[in-house]
Image (tube, rainbow, N blue to C red):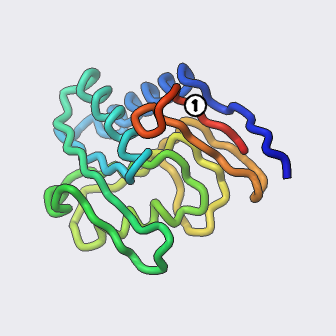
Amino acid sequence: MSAKKVLILNQEQIEKKTIRIAYQLVEDNFEETSLVLVGIADRGYVFAQRLKALLEKISVLDILLIRVTLDKTSSILNAKTDIPVEQAKGKVVILVDDVLNSGRTLAYGMGVFFDVPLKKMRSVVLIDRSHHKFPIFSDFSGLKLSTILKEHVSVNLHECDGGEDAAWLV
């Protein structure tokens, strides 16, 4: 198998797509006074931090940011949050991750809130690969990408990985 990397998003494109998603979130929640952004550690949380900063610039929404750490290899939901999930009660929750592939990670992220009555839940991903094994879909995405199963999407965010932001198809 080739070790060829194809750049699919550069730093400027990631920034533009993040801004577009922030505006879409404002439009989707124009009647709300607050939102809860839930970032899936690690890159999803960084992406959620960026969205929070943008939302605070372009709207008057009060934004609560929750970090969810998941055991993605477990066959059962094993998750921790930095803030009690009960703080999301009755609010709009936006689940954020970098890449949607099979849907397992977002499904586990949603599972954290099953016992919390929410107003609504939406999902945001930077890249949606369209290889879902679970009935999970992104409400907002920077890029929808059809790939073959053996290809992989690698996202570099400077807060996590150093260097410039970029996404590659490997």
Q: Residue at x 45, y 31 (%)?
A: 158
How many numbered dots are placed on residues in this image? Answer: 1
Q: Which residue is drawn at 42% across and 39% down?
A: 160
Closest to the observer, 40 or 131? 40
Q: Which residue lies furthest to the right in this view?
A: 1
Q: Which residue is disc 1 drawn over? A: 166
Q: Which residue lies furthest to the bottom in this view?
A: 76
- Location of residue 150 in the rendering, given as x and y in whole percent from the top left corner: 77, 57
Q: Which quadrant of the view contains residue 149?
A: bottom right
- Location of residue 111 in the rendering, given as x and y in whole percent from the top left corner: 36, 69
Q: Is residue 58 above or below residue 160?
A: above
- Location of residue 45 in the rendering, given as x and y in whole percent from the top left corner: 36, 45
Kindly identify the amino acid type of the residue bearing the numbered disc 1: Ala
Relative placement, left or right, of 146 versus 144 is right
- Location of residue 60 in the rendering, given as x and y in whole percent from the top left corner: 18, 27
Q: Which quadrant of the view contains residue 108?
A: bottom left
